[in-house]
Amino acid sequence: MASKRVTVFGGSGFLGRRIVKCLAAEGTEVCVGVRHPERASFLQRFGRDGQIELAHADVWDESTVAQAVKRSDSVINAVGHYVEKGPATFDAIHGQGALHVARQARQAGADRLIHISGLGADPASDSPYVRARGIGEVLVGEAFEGVTILRPGVIFGAGDSFFNTLAGMARQAPVLPLFGRGRTKLQPVFVGNVAEACVKVLADPSTKGEVYELGGPRVYTYKALVRLVLEQVDRRRALVPIPFLVWDTLAAFMAVLPNPPLTRDQVKLMKRDNVIEGTVSTLEDLGVAPVAVEEILPTYIE
């Protein structure tokens, strides 16, 4: 790995920065493709002088993608987009944007491509987000032979939006609403485990063309995770079941806001279990020991 050059798209994001740090620790030369390089200078402290290069790249602008992947042996697409706004639709980022990365990685002669997708990705889904993820996997597979696809569940760790949002609500709100009865099953995966998985994949040629579903060692209901957060912040709150019909209505009204705190697609996602299913390859197959929520949550939620 030390003699390799890897381009990471979305390298300044919650997951991307961990991937960059792990690669730098291996001695890898890293090019970080981001829309605003001036905001990503903090990444350079993860490596020695000149080891981490910042490049302007927008996955929707294929010419900038082409520049970012020049001379790279491997490419990782860690771009995550969770709320549609203007031209930044799920299809533009996770569909066509993913295609641009795969196509330019192939044309640049990169040997490896890792595409970060998500558990449950399905091109036939009624959820725009899940459908775009599924379509992206299909497009990437057609554009780059041997792409390795990683499908993480809800990713957690210091700075995450999931547990930090719950903790903020637990501290301020007198009651905590549940999606339905809070029975939706989730299998959160530690961000450090996902980053480690990327390094393992690049180091092992046998992972070419494989799909890995990444989840933690335990499955929880949403209600159980809320209770974990309450215990961590030392609060007592009533947990109130709210029918999904009510959530759908609230999200519809919020859609007119510039930055809605809740979208109809997010409600759809909470109606489905988000766990590893079937006999697919997982973190353990990559030699990564998954870390449980209970081990990490106390390190960043107080």
Image (tube, helix red, strand yellow):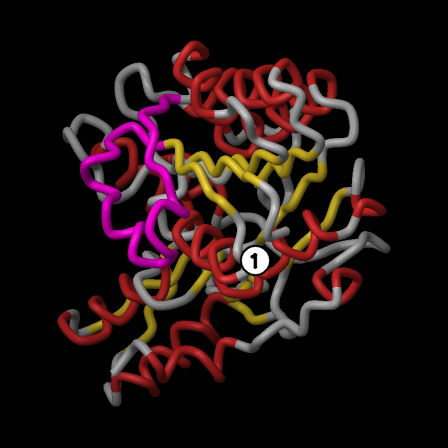
Quadrant of the rendered structure where residue 218 is?
bottom right
Q: Position of residue 248 (x, y in %)?
A: 36, 39
Q: Position of residue 246 (x, y in %)?
A: 33, 46
Q: With respect to residue 298, does 83 lie above or below? A: above
Compared across the picture, whether 138 is left or right of 161 comes to: right
Q: Residue at x 57, y 64 (%)?
A: 193
Q: Amino acid at mark 1?
A: Val
Q: Secondary structure at mark 1?
A: helix
Tag 1 residue: 194
User: Which region is colored magenta?
Assistant: 34-58
Compared across the picture, whether 25 is left or right of 210 comes to: left
Q: Nearer the viewer, residue 80 or 6?
A: 6
Q: Residue at x 63, y 72 (%)?
A: 290
Compared across the picture, whether 227 is left or right of 189 comes to: left
Query: In the rendered structure, does residue 3 fall within the stretch colored magenta?
Result: no
Q: Nearer the viewer, residue 178 or 230?
A: 230
Query: In the rendered structure, does residue 49 fall within the stretch colored magenta?
Result: yes
Q: Residue at x 45, y 34 (%)?
A: 9
